[in-house]
């Protein structure tokens, strides 16, 4: 029984995002404790924020926001995420953020 719990906890740690994904975002582990997140067809900023909040405190190599149409990205949508690369593909926004600050939380992590 203890061995089974240990294996389950190790599996959850190494594959973390597989058990936490909520649409419109999903993630795939690409290396030990590193993931790739893809958010597709997002139309509600609050829904996107809720989906990404379940993936916080995990190293994310690449975050894709694809085929989405949003008014804006919530200013703190990236807080707590450790994103190295961000790709906005085939997506439209009326504004990048709801406030004067866009991409808050990614200032030291995001690579251009």
Image (cartoon, helix red, strand yellow):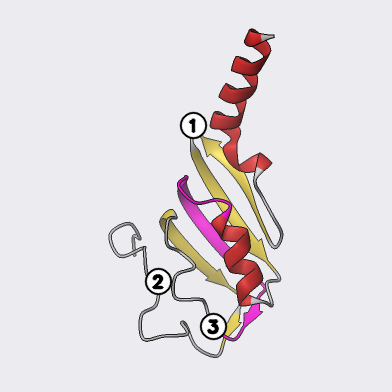
- Residue 19 picture location, percent across and down: 67, 40
Marked residue nearer the N-terminal end (3 or 2): 3
Q: Nearer the viewer, mark 1 or mark 2?
A: 2
Q: Please give the range of residues in magenta.
A: 54-72
To which quarter of the image does residue 7 belong?
A: top right
Q: What residue appears at the point 36 percent right and 64 percent down from the top-left corner?
A: 105
Quadrant of the snapshot with the N terminus = top right
State the residue position of label 2.
103
Percent position (x, y) of residue 33?
48, 35
Q: Residues within 10 Å of mark 2 (few under 14, many from 20)?
A: some
Residue behind mark 1: 32
Residue lying at 37% horizontally and 70% vertically, measured from the top left: 104
Is label 2 in a helix, a strand or a loop? loop
- Spatial CA distance of label 1 from label 2 is 26 Å
Q: Residue at x 34, y 60 (%)?
A: 111
Q: Which residue is mark 3?
A: 72
In this orientation, does residue 55 appear?
Answer: yes
Which residue lies most toward the front here? Answer: 1
Query: In the rendering, at what x and y percent does residue 83 appear?
Result: 43, 55
Task: Check residue 37 for magenta coloring.
Answer: no
The answer to which of marks 1 and 2 sits earlier in the sequence is: 1
Residue 90, placed above or below residue 26 = below
Of the residues under marks 1 and 3, which one precedes in the sequence? 1
Q: Quadrant of the C terminus?
A: bottom left
What is the tally of numbered marks visible in this picture? 3
Q: CA distance from mark 3 to mark 2?
A: 11 Å
Mark 1 and mark 3: Cα distance apart in space: 32 Å
Q: Which numbered mark, 1 or 3, is in the foreground of this view?
A: 3
């Amino acid at each position: 029984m203890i061995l089974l719990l240990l294996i389950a906890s190790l599996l959850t740690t190494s594959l973390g995002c597989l058990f936490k994904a909520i649409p419109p975002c999903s993630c795939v582990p690409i290396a030990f404790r590193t993931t790739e997140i893809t958010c597709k067809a997002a139309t509600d900023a609050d829904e996107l924020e809720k989906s990404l909040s379940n993936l916080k405190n995990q190293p994310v190599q690449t975050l894709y926001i694809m085929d989405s149409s949003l008014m804006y990205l919530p200013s703190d949508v990236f807080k707590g995420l450790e994103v190295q690369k961000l790709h906005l593909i085939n997506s439209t926004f009326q504004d990048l953020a709801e406030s004067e600050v866009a991409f808050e939380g990614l200032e030291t992590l995001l690579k251009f």
